[in-house]
Image (cartoon, helix red, strand yellow):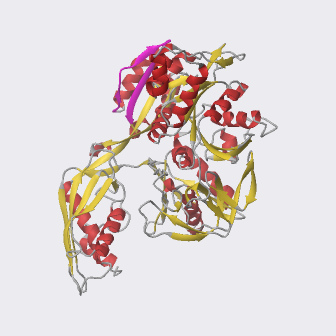
């Protein structure tokens, strides 16, 4: 049986979970149609999801078709859970991107599409909610081509749009579409230029072949709530060419999700690219493609979905499939299972948390809460739980306030802990203002000897951190150079202003050791001093997060909205006017725009549409930003730092 892993993605309220329910129902997998509004959706299994009517965790379901097992991964649509969306990318073969005909292309839709197109994933677009009053499918199609790709081709057409009696039928191929598809398919283009009449089967065959290569995107119109277009969606999905997998090949896969179950313990969700896994097998786990210290774990149990959301025990996971594997106690999200194979993609996870929140349970013993938060961080590494023993504080990172509600629910439901959360504070970052040098010679009091010289160079915004060494092994043995690199990655979490340092290239340019006096820990002590010395010499530039926002509101509000954007230190392009509405795209500092969705809703009497996505970090005037309280001893206080590292404090 062939296997296809389908990831379903959409901006919030586009009807993603409703579409999943329709696919399950129309395929005969479920006997009753679930509802998001009624809290009966099959893939919304958390109480908080049913209460709010939104997905906060990726969820799986299976549809068994003749000769095909279709694994569906339903992902959250809210920006707060973008990390969950990115993790799902580790498991999928093909993408279904859902766009609401009522809201059109949102900033998050563009963000999704960019990620998928870069990975060359086969992608279908389902334009949902064609029954909504006032929709304009022609405008939506034009917007999709302008903002996503000109290589979008409708496979059906709409009748009675904006009406509960809407319907769809096989679409026509317009000359512009024929020219476009022929331009991408050499054989088809030659036949067209020779004057041959191209059949619908030829055109669609070329479209689906190109879709399989990630070079063209079929578009299907429909209404999931009314079941319109679902059969066409499923048929189109089945016509896209599928990759072949080798069960007999080398074991290679990816951990894309971690859960902790009350009865069975830690559960690793694994997508297998090749080979097979069986119960009692010993397998290798790698943190990255460059990991030279693999962990060996033993599989104790394998479970997977049989139909819909029903789970069954099985003895084997084969290539191309996904399953839940138990016994892998050290497994982390993003781990490579088995061997690294050049033929497979191992995408990295790049979501950036925007807020810090302090969490407490009001008791004198923080251990139960800390243990619970560490377990939840294992399931969502973005939370990045940190314990500060001096202040006795637990800090977690996150994308937004809805995550606080979810964490509060999980702590109470799973661990019986009633947690309190502080108000979110924005996470700033730092970078160096100019190139410079950092130096430390730790040679007293004996026995010790570690000399570190670092070069600093600013990198473009968004480039991240880069490290290299110009020092030979005779000058500093490579084992000590690895200590320097490891120490840097930890030290960079706090710069001069207490924020993580980024967009900088650091080069080990010099240093020294002593064959008698150097202790293995000396470079862990000296490197942070050299780093902070370099930050002082180069100067630190504060960086703040920006959001890319899209606003649709009544035309008469355009002047007020533009004034608000300017007051928030935002930047915006030329507004467009259509159908009595103004369309504005802007980049806004998070610090000034956190409450703007509420303000614009009030301003427009609830008629405005506002969507936002992360737009990177940019320089922030020091007086308009914030510093963070340093955790632990500052290496700039050299004497105290040495005492601290030598455990003399």
In the image, residue 272 lies at what x, y percent?
59, 55
Q: 82 or 60, which is in the foreground?
A: 60
The answer to which image quadrant residue 218 occupies is: top right
Task: Give the camera-side residue of 648 and 520.
Answer: 520
> What residue appears at the point 72 percent right and 64 percent down from the top-left corner?
263
Count of marks overlaid on the render: 0
The image position of residue 574, as x and y in percent, is: 36, 20
Question: Farthest right residue?
Answer: 31
In which quadrant of the rendered view does residue 222 lie?
A: top right
Q: Which residues are magenta?
A: 569-588
Relative placement, left or right, of 617 versus 93 is: left
- Identity of the residue drawn at 30% across and 43% down: 620
Magenta stretch, main secondary structure, is strand
Q: Is residue 411 above or below residue 179?
A: below
Q: Is residue 641 visible?
A: no
Where is residue 362 drawn, in percent x and y?
A: 58, 62
Q: In the figure, 52 relative to 457: above or below?
A: above
Residue 635 magenta-drawn?
A: no
Q: Is residue 505 above or below residue 576?
A: below
Position of residue 552 in the picture relative to residue 475 (left or right): right
Whether residue 586 appears in magenta in the rendering, the answer is yes
As rendered, which of 264 and 184 lies closer to the eye? 184
Q: Position of residue 313 (x, y in %)?
A: 75, 59
Point out the image quarter for the C terminus.
bottom left
Q: Residue at x 39, y 29 (%)?
A: 586
Between 564 and 514, the one lying in front of the other is 514
Residue 264 visible? The answer is yes
Q: Does 30 sit left or right of 82 as displayed?
A: right
């Amino acid at each position: 049986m062939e296997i296809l892993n389908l990831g379903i993605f959409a901006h919030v309220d586009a009807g993603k979970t409703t579409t999943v329910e329709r696919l399950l129902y129309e395929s005969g997998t479920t006997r009753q149609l679930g509802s998001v509004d009624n809290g009966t959706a099959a893939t919304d299994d958390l109480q908080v999801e049913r209460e709010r009517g939104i997905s906060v965790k990726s969820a799986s379901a299976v549809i068994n078709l003749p000769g095909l097992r279709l694994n569906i991964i339903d992902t959250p649509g809210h920006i707060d859970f973008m990390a969950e969306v990115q993790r799902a990318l580790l498991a999928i073969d093909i993408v279904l991107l859902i766009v609401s005909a009522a809201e059109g292309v949102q900033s998050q839709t563009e963000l999704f599409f960019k990620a998928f197109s870069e990975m060359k994933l086969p992608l279908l677009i389902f334009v949902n909610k064609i029954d909504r009053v006032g929709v304009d499918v022609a405008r939506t199609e034009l917007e999709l081509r302008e903002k996503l790709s000109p290589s979008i081709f409708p496979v059906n057409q709409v009748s009675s749009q904006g009406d509960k009696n809407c319907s769809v039928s096989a679409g026509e191929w317009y000359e512009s579409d024929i020219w476009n598809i022929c331009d991408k398919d050499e054989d088809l283009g030659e036949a067209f230029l020779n004057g041959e009449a191209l059949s619908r089967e030829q055109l669609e065959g070329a479209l689906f072949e190109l879709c399989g290569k990630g070079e063209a995107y079929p578009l299907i119109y429909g209404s999931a709530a009314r079941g319109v277009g679902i059969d066409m969606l499923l048929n189109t999905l089945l016509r896209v060419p599928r990759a072949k997998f080798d069960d007999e090949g080398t074991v290679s896969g990816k951990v894309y999700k971690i859960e902790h179950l009350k009865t069975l313990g830690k559960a690793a969700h694994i997508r297998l690219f090749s080979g097979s896994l069986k119960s009692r097998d010993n397998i290798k786990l790698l943190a990255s493609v460059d990991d030279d210290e693999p962990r060996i774990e033993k599989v104790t149990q394998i479970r997977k979905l049989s139909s819909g959301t029903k789970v069954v025990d099985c003895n084997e996971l084969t290539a191309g499939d996904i399953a839940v594997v138990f016994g892998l106690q050290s497994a982390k999200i993003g781990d490579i299972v088995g061997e690294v194979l050049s033929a497979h993609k191992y995408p990295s996870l790049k979501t950036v948390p925007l807020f810090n929140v302090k969490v407490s349970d009001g008791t004198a013993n923080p251990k139960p809460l800390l243990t619970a938060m560490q377990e939840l961080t294992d399931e969502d590494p973005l939370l990045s739980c940190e314990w500060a023993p001096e202040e006795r504080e637990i800090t977690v990172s996150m994308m937004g306030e809805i995550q606080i509600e979810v964490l509060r629910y999980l702590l109470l439901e799973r661990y019986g802990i009633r947690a309190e959360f502080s108000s979110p504070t924005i996470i700033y970052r730092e970078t160096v203002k100019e190139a410079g040098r950092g130096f430390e010679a730790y040679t007293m009091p004996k026995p010790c000897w570690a000399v570190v010289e670092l070069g600093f160079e600013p990198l473009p915004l968004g480039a991240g951190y880069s490290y290299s060494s110009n020092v030979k092994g005779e000058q500093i043995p490579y084992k000590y150079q690895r200590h320097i690199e490891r120490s840097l990655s930890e030290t960079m979490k706090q710069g001069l202003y207490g924020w993580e340092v980024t967009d900088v290239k650091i080069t080990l340019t010099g240093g020294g050791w002593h064959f008698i006096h150097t202790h293995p820990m000396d470079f862990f002590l000296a490197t942070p001093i050299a780093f902070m010395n370099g930050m002082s010499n180069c100067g630190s530039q504060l960086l703040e997060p920006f959001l890319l926002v899209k606003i649709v509101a009544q035309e008469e509000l355009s002047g007020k909205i533009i004034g608000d954007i300017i007051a928030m230190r935002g930047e915006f392009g030329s507004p467009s006017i259509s159908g009595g509405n103004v369309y504005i795209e802007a980049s806004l500092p998070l610090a000034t725009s956190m409450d703007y969705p509420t303000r614009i809703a009030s301003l427009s009497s609830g008629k405005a549409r506002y969507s936002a996505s992360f737009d990177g970090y940019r320089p922030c005037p020091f007086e308009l930003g914030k510093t963070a309280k340093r955790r632990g001893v500052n290496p700039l206080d050299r004497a105290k730092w040495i005492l601290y590292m030598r455990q003399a404090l």
